[in-house]
Image (cartoon, rainbow, N blue to C red):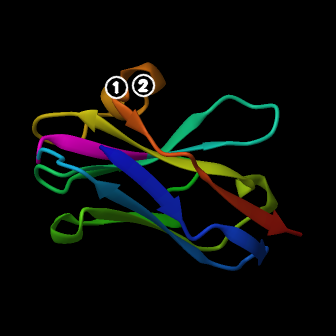
Amino acid sequence: VQLVESGGGLVQAGGSLRLSCEASGFIYDSYAIVWFRQAPGKEREAVSCISRNDGTTYSSDSVKGRFTIAGDNAANTVYLQLNSLKPEDTAVYYCAAVWMSGSARVNVCTNTDAMDYWGKGTLVTVAS
């Protein structure tokens, strides 16, 4: 399984971007896709997660109401819509896949060590 992120770039504060995570290879419907981000000098943090099994989602408090995760299972692609961007959203955004049955669960979605596959990341820079 290979995960490839795209859609990052430079945007002004208040602007929007849409990130894509395309999976190649076989992915079971029981995998969840998680978006993480890592800012310079900070730990990697989970941003949003979607269960490919039932479409349920999780978003961290820091992005809730601004970022939206959505999946297109037929295209093996998960999107992260970033709205109302702030300079503190500047980070490398990674997508990851983790085996998860049923609905999205916070304890799995936020566990970096639990991820089975990782993409290489895409850089989002928000200028003030």
Residue 30 counted in the magenta span:
yes
- Look at discs 1 and 2 and give the one toward the viewer: 2
Q: Which residue is mark 1?
A: 107
Count how many numbered circles sit on residues in the image.
2
| Drawn side of residue 41 relative to residue 78, left or right | right
Q: Which residue is mark 2?
A: 111
| Drawn side of residue 37 relative to residue 27, left or right | right
Q: Are marks 1 and 2 in contact (CB under 8 Å)?
A: yes
Between residue 18 and residue 26, name the one nearer to us: 26
Question: In the displayed structure, would residue 25 be above or below residue 74?
Answer: above
Question: Where does residue 16 sit, x and y in percent of width and height?
Answer: 62, 78
Question: Where does residue 62 sit, x and y in percent of width and height?
Answer: 59, 49
| Helix, strand or loop for the magenta stretch, by majority | strand
Separation of disc 1 and disc 2 at Cα?
6 Å
> Quarter of the image containing the N terminus?
top left
Residues packed near mark 2 inside 10 Å, few (<14), some (14 to 19) or many (20 plus): few
Q: Residue at x 33, y 29 (%)?
A: 116
Between residue 21 and residue 18, name the one nearer to us: 21
Query: In the rendered structure, which segment of residues is drawn in magenta?
Result: 29-34
Q: Please state which amino acid type lies under the numbered disc 2.
A: Asn
Question: In the displayed structure, would residue 34 be above or below residue 11?
Answer: above
Residue 47 shows in this picture: yes
Tag 1, which secondary structure?
helix
Between residue 113 and residue 46, name the one nearer to us: 113
Tag 2, which secondary structure?
loop
Residue 90 counted in the magenta span:
no
| Drawn side of residue 18 relative to residue 33, left or right | right
| Drawn side of residue 110 relative to residue 102, left or right | right
Q: Please state which amino acid type lies under the numbered disc 1.
A: Asn
Between residue 47 and residue 31, name the one nearer to us: 31
